[in-house]
Image: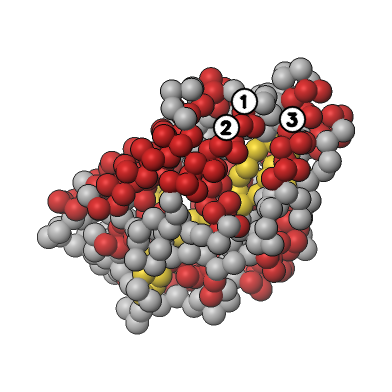
C-alpha cells in the first residue's frame, strides 16, 4: 500500500502493532535457533555505496504506524544534515520482524542498523551477528546512565545501545477503583493491598469487570516479584536464579487471586495476545493490569475509551524490584559495509535534540538525559503520565541485569504455556512449577 504522505512512498512501510507479552517469545525463539547453523560464513551485506559515492543504509525496526511517522521524520532530518547518506527503513509487528530478521542474518543480508529486543541481544551476539561498538562504530553514550547501558553489555563489551528507557508499572482505571471503594495504588502498597482491591472491584461489578488481568504467566512480572525477594531470573553464569519453590509461590499467589474472582478467568486470560482487540482493559472487562510505561502514547486514553492512571508495582519488601529497562535497543550488523555511518545514524537518533523532540516517548523515555529533561517540560496527556511516573520511581530503580542467556526466549514462552495448565486446572502450581523448571533448564543447555 502506498503511504498517504508522498514523501514517504520510497520507504518500505508495513503495518505493525505493539509487541505481545503472550506468544511472541515462542515463535521468535524457534526462529532464532536457526541462526546457529546458518550465520557462519555468510557474505558481507547490509547497505551499499552507489556509483555517486553516496552511502545507503538500511534500518529495520518493529512498531506501529504512529512510531513510523516520527521515525521517518527523524530519518529525513538526518538525511538533510548528512546528504551523502540515505537511510531506507522497514518495520513490522514484533513476531514478523524477528522472523524476517533471523532469515536475513542467516543469509548475510541483514539491515545495517537493527532495532533489538533486550531479551535477544545475547542470542544474536553469540551468533556473531552484532558488531561491538568501538573505534569502528563510535556512538556518544556519555548522556546515557551506566545502569541502562548495562543491558547491552556482554562480558564487558557493548553490543546494543538503548533507544529508550522504560520500567514496569501497574495500569488501572481510577474511576472503576473509586466506584468500588478500592484504595488507590501508590508507592509502598503491597501484594495484599492488591488482592483486597481487585477482589473488591470484581465483587462491586458482579464480575462484569474483573479487578485485574491475570498476570501469573508473564515472566516479566514474575521477575519483578523475584527481585523484591532478593533473586534474579538468571545468574551471572546464565543459569536460572530461582527454584521450583519460587515459581510455586508465585503461581499460588496469582492462581489464588483468579480463583477468588479477583483476576480474569482462564478463557479470557488466554486470549490476551498484545492486540487491542483482545485486551481485557480495552474491552472494559478488567480494571487493571501490569505493563511497561513505554506503552503510554498520545492515543492511550482514546484506545482505552477512558482515562487511566499508573502506579509502581506492589511490594511486600523494602525493594521495589523494578529496574530501568531498555524499552528497545539498537545494534549494528556485524557484516555491515558501513559501520561508521551506521553508528553516526544511531548517534544522531539518540543524541540530537531536534530528533529527540520529534520522537518524544515513541520508544520510551529518551535515553539522553539532557534531552529527557527538556522533553519532559513539553509533554501532556499519557506521555506526561509516563514521564512523571519515571521521576517518581527513579531513585528506586536498580541496574538492569545483563542480557538473558541463549534459550531465554524459550524459557519465557514455556513459563506462559505451563501456567495455562494451572489456570485450566490441569496441574497444581507445585507440579506445574516442577515441570517448568525441568523444561527451562533443558532450554538453557540445548
**At x 15% / y 51%, what residue is drawn?**
37
Reading the image, the residue beneath label 1 is 259
Residue 250 seen in render: yes
- In the picture, measured across the screen, residue 112 lies left or right of residue 6, that is left
Instruction: Calculate the distance from the C-alpha at mark 2 to the C-alpha at mark 3.
Output: 13 Å
Q: Looking at the figure, which quarter contains the N terminus?
A: top left
* Residue placed most toward the observer, 415 or 24: 415
Q: For numbered disc 1, what is the local secondary structure?
A: helix
- Between the residue at mark 1 and the residue at mark 2, the CA separation in whole angstroms equals 6 Å
Is 258 located above or below residue 343 in the figure?
above
Vertical comparison of 423 with 92: above or below: above
Please provide percent x and percent y for residue 342. 37, 67
Q: Which residue is mark 3?
A: 199
Pointer 3 local density, CA inside 10 Å: few below 14, some 14–19, many at least 20? many
**Where residue 387 sits: x, y (%)?**
71, 58
Residue under the point 60% across and 49% down: 292
* Label 3: element kind: helix
Q: Quadrant of residue 47?
A: bottom left
Name the residue that disc number 2 marks: 255
Residue 23 screen position, x and y as percent: 42, 35
Q: Please report whichever mark, 1 or 3, sits nearer to the chain's N-terminal start.
A: 3
Residue, x 51% and y 26% (percent of image)?
423
| Distance from Cα at disc 1 to Cα at disc 3 | 10 Å
Amino acid at each position: 500500500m502506498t503511504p498517504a504522505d508522498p514523501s514517504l512512498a520510497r520507504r518500505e512501510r508495513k503495518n505493525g502493532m505493539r509487541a505481545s507479552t503472550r506468544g511472541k517469545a515462542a515463535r521468535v525463539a524457534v526462529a532464532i535457533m536457526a541462526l546457529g547453523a546458518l550465520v557462519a560464513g555468510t557474505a558481507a551485506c547490509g547497505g551499499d555505496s552507489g556509483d555517486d559515492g553516496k552511502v545507503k543504509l538500511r534500518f529495520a525496526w518493529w512498531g506501529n504506524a504512529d512510531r513510523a511517522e516520527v521515525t521517518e521524520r527523524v530519518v529525513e532530518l538526518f538525511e538533510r544534515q548528512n546528504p551523502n547518506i540515505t537511510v531506507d527503513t522497514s518495520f513490522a509487528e514484533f513476531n514478523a520482524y524477528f522472523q524476517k530478521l533471523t532469515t536475513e542474518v542467516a543469509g548475510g543480508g541483514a539491515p545495517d542498523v537493527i532495532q533489538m529486543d533486550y531479551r535477544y541481544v545475547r542470542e544474536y551476539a553469540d551468533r556473531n551477528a552484532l558488531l561491538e561498538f568501538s573505534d569502528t562504530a563510535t556512538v556518544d553514550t556519555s548522556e546515557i546512565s551506566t545502569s541502562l547501558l548495562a543491558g547491552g553489555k556482554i562480558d564487558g563489551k557493548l553490543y546494543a545501545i538503548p533507544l529508550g528507557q522504560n520500567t514496569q508499572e501497574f495500569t488501572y482505571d481510577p474511576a472503576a477503583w473509586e466506584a468500588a471503594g478500592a484504595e488507590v495504588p501508590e508507592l509502598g502498597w503491597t501484594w495484599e493491598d492488591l488482592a483486597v482491591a481487585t477482589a473488591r472491584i470484581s465483587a462491586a461489578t458482579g464480575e462484569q469487570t474483573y479487578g485485574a488481568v491475570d498476570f501469573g504467566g508473564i515472566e516479566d512480572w514474575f521477575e519483578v516479584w523475584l527481585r523484591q525477594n532478593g533473586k534474579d531470573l538468571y545468574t551471572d553464569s546464565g543459569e536460572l536464579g530461582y527454584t521450583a519453590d519460587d515459581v510455586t509461590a508465585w503461581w499460588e499467589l496469582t492462581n489464588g487471586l483468579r480463583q477468588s474472582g479477583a483476576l480474569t478467568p482462564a478463557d479470557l486470560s488466554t486470549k490476551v495476545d498484545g492486540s487491542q482487540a483482545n485486551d481485557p482493559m480495552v474491552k472494559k472487562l478488567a480494571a487493571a493490569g501490569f505493563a511497561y510505561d513505554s506503552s503510554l502514547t498520545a492515543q492511550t486514553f482514546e484506545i482505552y475509551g477512558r482515562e487511566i492512571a499508573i502506579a509502581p508495582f506492589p511490594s511486600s519488601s523494602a525493594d521495589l524490584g523494578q529496574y530501568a529497562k531498555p524499552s528497545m535497543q539498537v545494534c549494528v550488523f556485524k557484516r555491515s559495509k558501513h559501520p561508521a555511518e551506521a553508528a553516526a545514524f544511531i548517534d544522531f537518533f539518540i543524541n540530537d535534540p531536534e530528533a529527540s523532540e520529534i520522537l518524544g516517548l515513541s520508544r520510551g523515555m529518551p535515553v539522553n538525559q539532557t534531552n529527557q529533561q527538556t522533553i519532559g517540560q513539553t509533554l501532556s496527556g499519557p506521555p506526561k503520565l509516563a514521564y512523571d511516573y519515571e521521576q517518581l520511581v527513579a531513585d528506586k530503580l536498580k541496574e538492569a541485569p545483563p542480557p538473558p542467556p541463549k534459550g531465554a526466549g524459550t524459557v519465557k514462552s514455556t513459563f506462559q504455556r505451563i501456567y495455562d495448565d494451572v489456570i485450566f486446572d490441569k496441574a497444581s502450581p507445585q507440579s506445574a512449577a516442577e515441570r517448568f523448571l525441568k523444561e527451562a533448564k533443558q532450554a538453557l543447555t540445548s
